[in-house]
């Protein structure tokens, strides 16, 4: 994440600071029904900080300013888990500062000004509401598509017509900067997740690409360049969805097209191959030796797996234990 992406104009920063102060001084009479007044954790130096006795041991041992700093360094999904601990933490994680930083990082390609315009026009100025309702790709794990097909085997003396179930995966890891990594392999998820980053070697067969997310129809346009003597570009169209509000844990594979490109097109724009093929037709190719092919097999939807769950994921099961996987 670049520093320019989080450069906030003074006018917008003043408006945000006003909303944060209003959040801390807002009266919540419904909390009195529990007999205990629950206070959110204010930032260090805030005008709302007053001496307060909290019966919870962790709150007496851990100062509020340190608790605030801990929350400020947590991922949004970890904040959601922390909100289940107690009422105080629940209302603390609703602090707009936490969700502002998460939103500006997730949609940094749109720019700060554009994000603020969308915030005011569609989400009533609530960063948390924007995080939950606005479509976004998740960057804290891998999107995995598990595909299987049946291949005829060699006839043996015991079995006349053997068949084999072949299983392979498509792996995608997105980055907030508009780049992503792609791998097509039969390796298990827990093995691929160890080197699915930009520091991987060429022997790992990871391909880099760029993507854009449309805010109108939740569709993703992505492109990957296969280098070599005959450069080939893989164009991917996806539709983002989720099994719950804010989950964004499923992607439907709408189309998968391979086309040829000439050397002049990729000589200076290798890092932005999507800009080269943007607007191409499905049957369009710029290299007569490599025809455009629209793939119809291996179109299983993608499932998102967080990094902390890759070891226990059912996608690591072999075909003899799970011959078919329903993504939902």
Image (cartoon, grey):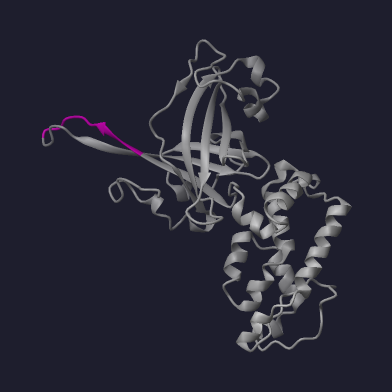
> Is residue 8 toward the left or the right of residue 193 in the image?
right
Magenta-drawn stretch contains 178: no
Give the vertical position of 157 relative to 134 (above or below): above
Q: Position of residue 81 (x, y in %)?
A: 57, 67
Residue sitting nearer the eye, 290 or 198: 290
State which region is magenta.
Answer: 148-157
* Residue 169 placement: quadrant: top left
Residue at figure coordinates x 66%, y 89% from the top left: 55
Q: Which residue is at the far top?
A: 288
Q: Which residue is at the far right?
A: 10
Give the vertical position of 100 relative to 318 (above or below): below
Q: Position of residue 116 (x, y in %)?
A: 76, 50
Residue at figure coordinates x 86%, y 59% from the top left: 14
Q: Position of residue 325 (x, y in %)?
A: 35, 47
Give the vertical position of 42 relative to 179 (above or below): below
* Residue 98 placement: quadrant: bottom right
Whether residue 72 is visible here, answered yes or no, is yes
> Is residue 142 toward the left or the right of residue 20 in the image?
left
> Is residue 303 toward the left or the right of residue 136 in the image?
left
Residue at figure coordinates x 39%, y 29% from the top left: 296
> Is residue 255 toward the left or the right of residue 60 in the image?
left
Q: Position of residue 216 (x, y in %)?
A: 61, 40
Residue at figure coordinates x 86%, y 50% from the top left: 9
Magenta-drawn stretch contains 155: yes
Query: How many numbered dots are placed on residues in this image?
Result: 0
Residue sitting nearer the eye, 28 or 308: 28
Whether residue 205 is visible here, answered yes or no, is no
């Amino acid at each position: 994440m670049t520093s320019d992406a989080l450069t906030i104009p003074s006018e917008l920063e003043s408006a945000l600071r006003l909303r944060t102060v209003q959040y801390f001084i807002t009266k919540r009479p419904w909390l009195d029904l529990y007999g205990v007044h629950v206070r959110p954790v204010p930032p260090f130096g805030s005008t709302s900080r007053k001496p307060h006795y909290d019966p919870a041991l962790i709150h007496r041992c851990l100062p509020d300013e340190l608790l605030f700093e801990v929350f400020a360094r947590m991922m949004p999904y970890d904040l959601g888990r922390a909100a289940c601990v107690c009422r105080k933490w629940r209302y603390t994680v609703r602090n707009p500062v936490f969700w502002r930083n998460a939103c500006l990082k997730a949609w940094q390609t749109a720019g700060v000004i554009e994000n603020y315009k969308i915030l005011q026009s569609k989400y009533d100025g609530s960063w948390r509401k924007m995080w939950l309702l606005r479509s976004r790709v998740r960057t804290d794990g891998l999107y995995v598509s598990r595909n299987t097909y049946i291949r005829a085997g060699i006839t043996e003396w015991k079995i006349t017509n053997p068949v084999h179930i072949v299983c392979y995966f498509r792996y995608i890891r997105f980055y907030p900067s508009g780049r992503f990594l792609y791998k097509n392999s039969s390796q298990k998820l827990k093995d691929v997740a160890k080197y699915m980053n930009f520091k991987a070697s060429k022997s790992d067969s990871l391909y880099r690409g760029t993507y854009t997310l449309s805010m109108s129809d939740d569709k993703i346009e992505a492109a990957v360049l296969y280098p070599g003597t005959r450069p080939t570009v893989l164009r991917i169209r996806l539709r983002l969805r989720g099994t719950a509000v804010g989950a964004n844990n499923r992607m439907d594979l709408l189309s998968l097209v391979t086309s040829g490109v000439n050397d002049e097109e990729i000589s200076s724009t290798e890092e932005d191959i999507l800009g080269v093929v943007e607007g191409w037709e499905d049957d369009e190719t710029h290299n007569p030796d490599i025809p455009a092919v629209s793939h119809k097999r291996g179109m299983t939807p993608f499932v998102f797996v967080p990094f902390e769950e890759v070891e226990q994921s059912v996608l690591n099961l072999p075909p003899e234990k799970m011959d078919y996987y329903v993504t939902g």
